[in-house]
Amino acid sequence: MQQGWLTKTFKGDRAIWGLVALFMVYSLLAVYSSSVSVAFKIHGGNTTYFLRSQFFMLLLSLIIIVVVHYLPYRIYFSMAGLILIISAGLLVLTFIFGARVNEATRWLVIPGTGFRLQTSDIAKVALVLYLARTLAKYQNELNNFMLVTKYLMVPIAIICGLILPENLSTAMMIFGISMIILFIGRVPFKFLLAYLGMAIVGVVLFALVLTVVTKDNRVQVWKNRIEHYFSGAPDEEGNYQSNQAKIAISTGGLFGKAPGRSTQRNMLPQSNSDFIFAIIIEEYGLLLGAIPLILAYMILLFRGITITKKCETAFPALMVLGLIVMIVVQAILNMMVAVGLFPVTGQTLPMVSWGRTSVLVMSFSIGAILSVSRVVNARIKKEELSAEEVSDEGDKIYEPAKT
């Protein structure tokens, strides 16, 4: 009875539902453990502040996944352009009226609630939906450089350009994800090389303009992070965080120190978000922390490809692949930062790190993927039932007459 209720409520790919549950378990355990000392200092001794916040967000995210996975995915085809325009408008509002935190204006505060919306997360998903729709619409005309530039590269450039001044790493990540989606969508590789060259020139010119004309200190921040990463100076902020994360990983070993016994959580400023992967390894080790999470994201990628192969049309296939690539690339980037293979970027670990907008956006993405899976599975099941009916009718027709 209970299994029947679960099957009727949570439709679509069961493996992805299982991964969602796994991510949530890791999230609650790691967020609570990594944020106890921070919560005690900032929130007047309330050590469960971040745990309660994350529990509420994960509960809300589960509701979002369930609701979205029941929606017909076709609505995103017709609404992708409007969603992209709205997200671009939110980025403009953030640029003008956004809240400034840690010397960067990346959040838009919703009046009367105090809730901070990171609009780049919304724009990221909106762009993926738009690219899937446009690639599907013009799939037979992608050898036309001007068409691809007008309908695909210009929107990418606008979104990345609006994010770039305050968040270089996110702009670069979104651009990279977009290039992967275009490659999957069969845009000629020579076009992608040309766009990559244009992007590099554009970023350099933009940085020069900011430096010479406005003397903006964000350019200096970008420069310092890159220089400090390669220099390895331990007293710099980015390297300090990276070094503390490396210590957490190295002391975790194969089996970890056990849940709640992390020491580096007291040293890492972003222990419950950007560097939560390091805390997970410190407490659960390589065997129970790192490897299961890495495998989980790889399985998510594999299941997304499996769903794509079952799609009969281009849009749902491209949407699923685009959203899966977005989630997995961000996860890999977060892990690379934690182990010191990439400069500090500020990207969270999807569905695991403490967060608000990022958790909700990732939940929507997983819900949309499950929506396609639900429809595809229903179609395949219907075809199998029809085939069985035809087979049964055939058995009746050719059944030998009894004497």
Image: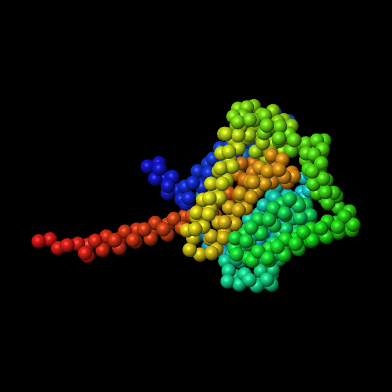
Quadrant of the image containing the C terminus: bottom left
Q: Where 351 falls versus 244 (above or below)?
A: below
Q: Where 344 falls versus 71 (above or below)?
A: above
Q: Position of residue 70 (x, y in %)?
A: 49, 54
181 or 361: nearer the eye? 181
Residue in the image at 69% along x and 53% along y: 173
Occupied quadrant, residue 282: top right
Quadrant of the image containing the N terminus: top left
292 or 348: nearer the eye? 292
| Name of the residue lying farthest toward the left | 403
Residue in the image at 67% along x and 52% along y: 121
Q: Where 346 falls versus 325 (above or below)?
A: above
On screen, residue 157 versus residue 259, left or right, reads: right
Would residue 142 be seen by someone viewing this image from the given angle?
yes
Q: Position of residue 259 (x, y in %)?
A: 60, 29
Residue in the image at 51% along x and 64% along y: 313
Occupied quadrant, residue 263: top right
Residue in the image at 83% along x and 56% along y: 207
Q: Where 164 falls versus 245 (above or below)?
A: below
Q: Position of residue 395 (x, y in %)?
A: 24, 61
291 or 170: nearer the eye? 291
